[in-house]
Image (spheres, rainbow, N blue to C red):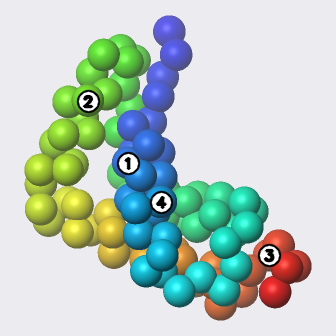
Amino acid sequence: MKMVNVMETIVKDVFMSNIGHLNLSCSCERCQADIMAHALNHLPPRYIVNPNHQPYVRAVHETDRDGAINILRVVTQAATIVSKDPRCGNV
């Protein structure tokens, strides 16, 4: 069975929904991946083995106001850190 970390999808959705507000110094694919990786390293994983459960896990995080704010906070911090020192060489 394949395991999936639902938090990856949640972080990507939060990041993409707020990308215009994050004041990124670079928004290349590498910087985006670095931001999401940094954020995921600071959030607890949420693994599932049944893909049918993904909507339920996502719903818990989307309806939990404190949890949703925490995810946005972590993504914002990751964006700030990566933007200060991008590893892509484009800036």
Earlier-in-chain disc, 3 versus 4:
4
Residue position for label 1: 10
Instruction: Tell me if 72 is positioned left or right of 1 in this view.
Output: left
Earlier-in-chain disc, 2 versus 3:
2
Which residue occupies 59% across, 82% down? 24
Residue position for label 4: 16
Which residue occupies 67% across, 72% down? 27
Q: CA distance from mark 3 to mark 1?
A: 24 Å
Q: Position of residue 86 (x, y in %)?
A: 74, 80
Earlier-in-chain disc, 3 versus 1:
1
- Kindly state the secondary structure of the residue where label 4 is placed: helix
Q: CA distance from mark 2 to mark 3?
A: 34 Å
Question: As shown in the figure, which amino acid type bears the numbered disc 2?
Answer: Pro
Question: As shown in the figure, which amino acid type bears the numbered disc 3?
Answer: Arg
In front of the other: label 3 or label 4?
Answer: 4
Q: CA distance from mark 2 to mark 1?
A: 11 Å
Residue position for label 2: 55
Residue position for label 3: 87
